[in-house]
Structures are given as C-alpha cells and as structure tokens.
Image (cartoon, grey):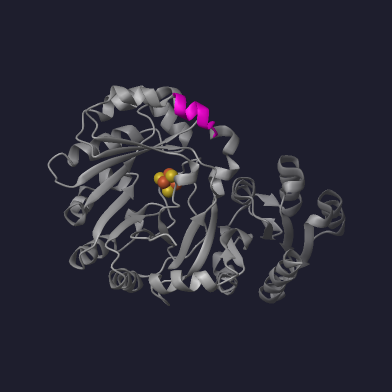
Amino acid sequence: MQDYREVCLFLTLRCNQQCRYCHRFLGIDEVGYEDNKRIIDKLTEDKIYNVTFTGGEPLLYPNILELLKYAKEKGIKSKIITNGEILAKNPKMREIYNYLDSITLSIDSIDNDINEKLGRGYNHFIKIKEVLDSLKNHKLKVNINTVVSKVNLNYLEELGDFLKEYNLNTWRIFKFAPLRETAKLNEKEFEISNVEFRTHKPIFASFPNINKIEFRENDDMESKYLLIMPNAEVIITENNEDVVIGNILENNISELLKNRVTTKKTSKIMEKIRTLISYNTETEIMPIINRIKELDYVDLIGISANGIDTYNKIVNLKPEIVFAEYNLEGMSGLELVEKSKQKLNDEMPVFNFISDNIPEEQVEEIVNIAGNKVMQLIQKNQMADKIVNALREYNDIKQD
Ligand code: SF4
C-alpha cells in the first residue's frame, strides 16, 4: 500500500474564479473551524506533517488565518494553493505568509484575453504580479501552477519570460486533465494530446534560472496524495476515479488505510445522484434542502432561484435530476424543458416540477418533448416528502 505522508486538505469548494477547465469537486459541505482543528490533530497523531491547504479558493474559508496559525503551532509544514485574488485585493490577508512553508499561485497566461477565456478574469495577470511582488521580501517558497491546454499552449514562452524575473522554487506545469465536473464538461475546448504537451517541453529549457520545472500528466496527478474533502471525507484517486475510504473525524488516516485492505466495497463520489433544485423563494425550500443533504446517495450540485440560472446550471453542471418550481422567475417549466432538449437532447436531466396548477396542455407538451425524462409533478404542500421519495426511487432504479 502506498505510504501517504502528504495530504491535500480541501477547506472549501467555493471559489471566486470560474475557470472553465476546473476539476474541483462540487456540492460538498464544509466542516467548521473546530472540526478542522481536529483534522490537524488527527494528522499529527499519524505523523503527517505536510499539508497542502486547497479548495476551491482556500482563502475564502472564514477561519483560514487562525487555522494556518494553529497548524504551524502543531508543527505542520503548510502549503497553500491559491488563485491570488484575495491576496491582491486585501493586503491584510498577507499575514498568512507568516504561517506558511510555501505558497503556490495559479497562472496560465500573461495575456488578459486568454485569462478571460479561461474563466480566471481579465485582470488575473496584474493580480498575480502584485502578489508575486509582495512575496519578494518573505522567506517562504513560491511556486507557480500552470495548466496547459489548447487555449494557452502557444503562449507559454511569454509566461516563462515573466516568471523568470521572480525567485521561484518550482514551476509546475500540468497537462489539462478532464478529471471531473466542469473539466469533463468542457473537455473538447481544452484537451491536448500527450504528444502536443511533450513537444512543448523544450520551450521550458530556455528558463534555466527557474529553480525547478516539473511536468505533470494525467496519471500522476493527485494519485500521490490523500485528499481530505471539506466534509472531512478522505479520498484516494486511482485510475482517474475517486474512492472514498472514510471520514477522518471518525477514524485516523492510518486506520482508514488499514481497513481499506479488507473493505471490498468502497463508495465513489460519481455514483451519487447529481441533483439540482430550483425554487423562487429560498426560505420555503431551505428545510427541504437540509433534508436532501442528509441523503448519502445524493450529491446536491446546485441550487437556483430563477429560470436562466437553472438552465445554465443544467447545461454546465449536467445534473441527472432536477426539481424545479414550474413558474420559475424568467422561465416556465415548459420553456426549460424545450431549451434543455434543444441543447442536450438525450443528455438532458430528469425533470420534476413543483406547482399546484400547471395547465393540462402544457403538461402534455412537456411529456411529448421530454418522454421518460419527466418523473413527476409535485404539489407544493407535499414537496418535502415527494422530493425525498423521488430521489429514493431514482436511486433504486440506478442500483438495479
Ligand atoms: S481552477 Fe482553481 S481558481 Fe479556478 S475555478 Fe477551479 S478552484 Fe477556482
């Protein structure tokens, strides 16, 4: 069994950028500060002293300063991977430099248009420059992560010219990997072959003053690390599959790894039902959302409060099942089904509509368009039980 001495702790999956190649997990809750302190304690009990804090954007985690300080007191060598936005905007957050062993910033191009296209935002380069400048007088190691894809493949040299002016520890160059979630959806836009990736390697030989340049391809990404999700579940990534081996708040990592040898069946994140909920009023739907979150076979990947956003989430996040108020602000259920069918055809989700009054002819039209992709129409006063039952039923169908 692999000996894991390094872990990646995903503090939050929230992010302030929208990279279109992002392969972070989605729809997983965060534990609070006290639980994260317990996670740190449990890691040190197992003599794991190398922790990479990541996300989403880890600096969005509310207690990040206290947590990094606590980790340092416990002897942890902390690394952080950040997109740099918060450090550029809020110099006070640079206090984290005092608690870190190394910091990794993400930049894929110095070209504003490319950054916009990648989803990082037009001014990403300027922000990273500001953060790199602010790190000049600090002792911590500074690394750069770059994802190479079809979009920036031919612009790496100018990025290297910029980076070589800084005293970098490592420049890690990742080949775009359609590992999960958004990255899988946008695979065609970003995918490059191993050959394309490798033939660009010689460019990097022209930056001898960058201490170390590492290249990472699909099969060596993340598999070296043990991943701890924001909800404290521990994941091993093997053959591009994420396998949950347990929860660190319940068992130490050493126990989870030991049990894993004898555990025949492991749960996989991808087996959960990818669910989207859309309702005009948040206060009415929140109690139901809380019930859904308790179902361990459901992955609530999105919540929405209007029609356009629901449609965008259907297209971008590809839920398997949608529970939507029929008259969503800005779009009726019928329009939602029509647009989804046009865009996704058979890949559109199963729709369940919540309403006390849907005109009969519209119901017929929906059934005509969606066929077996309509599961049921739900009265508002029964929606909690009906939604939970529909998910249970759907799960049973999936298991068969
Ligand atoms: S790649 Fe990183 S910065 Fe970009 S959206 Fe994903 S988590 Fe955020």
Asked whether residue 319 appears in the rendered view, the answer is yes
Q: Is residue 113 above or below residue 31?
A: above
Q: Is residue 195 magenta?
A: yes
* Left or right, 106 with reference to 243: left
Q: Nearer the viewer, residue 337 or 60?
A: 60
Q: Is residue 16 above or below residue 197?
A: below
Q: How many marks?
A: 0
Q: Nearer the viewer, residue 115 or 160?
A: 160
Q: Nearer the viewer, residue 239 or 172?
A: 239
Quadrant position of the C terminus in the picture: bottom right
Q: What segment is highlighted magenta in the picture?
A: 191-199
How far across and how far down the image is residue 157, in percent?
35, 22
Q: Residue at x 18, y 42 (%)?
A: 135
Q: Considering the whole magenta stretch, tell me its main secondary structure.
A: helix
Q: Residue at x 57, y 58 (%)?
A: 301
Q: Residue at x 20, y 63 (%)?
A: 72
How far across and how far down the image is residue 247, in percent?
45, 72
Residue at the front extreme of this rendering: 1
Residue 158: quadrant of the picture = top left
How far across and how far down the image is residue 227, in percent?
42, 59
Q: Is residue 234 magenta?
A: no
Quadrant position of the N terminus in the picture: bottom left
Residue at the left extreme of this rendering: 137
Q: Is residue 147 above or below residue 47?
A: above
How far across and how far down the image is residue 110, in percent?
35, 28
Q: Nearer the viewer, residue 278 or 226?
A: 226
Residue 257: quadrant of the picture = bottom left
Asked whether residue 278 appears in the rendered view, the answer is no
* Left or right, 363 with reference to 130: right
